[in-house]
Image (tube, rainbow, N blue to C red):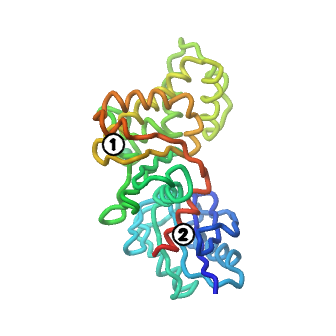
Amino acid sequence: MDKYVIGLDIGGTNMRGALLDGNEEQVDELKVPSQAHFGIERLVDNLIELVERIRGSKTIYGIGLGIPGIIDSAKGVITAAPNIAHVKDYPIRSVLNDRLGADINLVIENDANMVGLGEWRKGAGKEVDSMIMITIGTGLGGGLILDGELWSGAHGMGGEIGHMTINPEGPLCNCGSYGCLETYASAVAIRRMVAEALSDGSVATSLRDKVRDAGPADIPELVMEAALGGDEVALGIWQALGKALGIAIASLQNLLDVDMVVLGGGIANAWDFFIRTAEEEAALRGFSAPMEKLSIEKSVLGDDAGILGAGYLALKK
Ligand SMILES: [Zn+2]
């Protein structure tokens, strides 16, 4: 009988699932709303319906689940997840085993770890043994693949690259600390930098008109547009992001000496505006020998990385 697994990527708005065969090839895919704002019970109902639809009459051996939040992967528990309403220490693995079948092997990881695994198996990192994934979206997520294994920490809570301190005097972060990488390199950071630039009414920038009626989600795209038009303020925002990334990459490479850093997530689409600054800053700060061996690449799988990584982990375990 063919061996199938399902890889799932749970987001605050949507969840996606892919059916993978034993060769890690994707044979089917579905996307449904997660309705995470209604709470974890609704999300689990939607998740089960998604799994039932994908598996049809096939036998599923395992399910990999990437969830945004702090995940205790050993226990299969969501410790905390800011994007899912009212969730704390939720035993998602046992809940799903009760409802889907006790014989299904369920692996749960932070979503950024799954993205890292996917990009390493099937994307930019498929030729290397050690890789750091940095996903720059609303926040900043990290995934560490060391010597062909996901390193999610002694308690499954590691790889939080977004909360490395870049500037001790920097802005307050969602985590309660100050000057984390995420406060300089994320959609939230872009919005803060735009607001700060515009607070000085004497600064001339095309952003003033562009963002006036824009929703928060549209602002990074508008800063890309302005940079493309040569706007100095917009270009400066991408350089600030690149500099912070470069500082973080230098520290990570001094610590870990990996083959590759892969940058993904929606904000990484501004690649041309920040990558040179990031590379220069990393070269300036990191030890030269490991920095020269490091390549910094753009994600090639985009949104598919998370489901492919989750499916791979389900096949492997
Ligand atoms: Zn933080």
Figure quadrant of the N terminus: bottom right
Q: Position of residue 151 (x, y in %)?
A: 36, 60
Q: Give the residue drawn at x 46%, y 31%.
A: 242
Amino acid type of disc 2? Ile
Of marks 2 and 1, the one in the foreground: 1
Instruction: Sort mark 1 into few (<14), some (14-19) or many (20+) by Cα contacts within 10 Å.
Output: many
**What is the quadrant of the C terminus in the image?**
bottom left
Vertical placement of residue 165 versus 154, above or below: above
Of the image marks 2 and 1, the number of the one nearer the N terminus: 2
Residue 307 vs residue 87: left or right?
A: right
Residue at the disc numbered 2: 40
Q: Secondary structure at mark 1?
A: helix
Percent position of residue 71, x then y: 41, 65
Identify the residue at image location x=50%, y=17%: 200
Q: Position of residue 203 (x, y in %)?
A: 54, 14
Mark sitting on residue 242 = none
Q: Which mark is residue 253?
A: 1
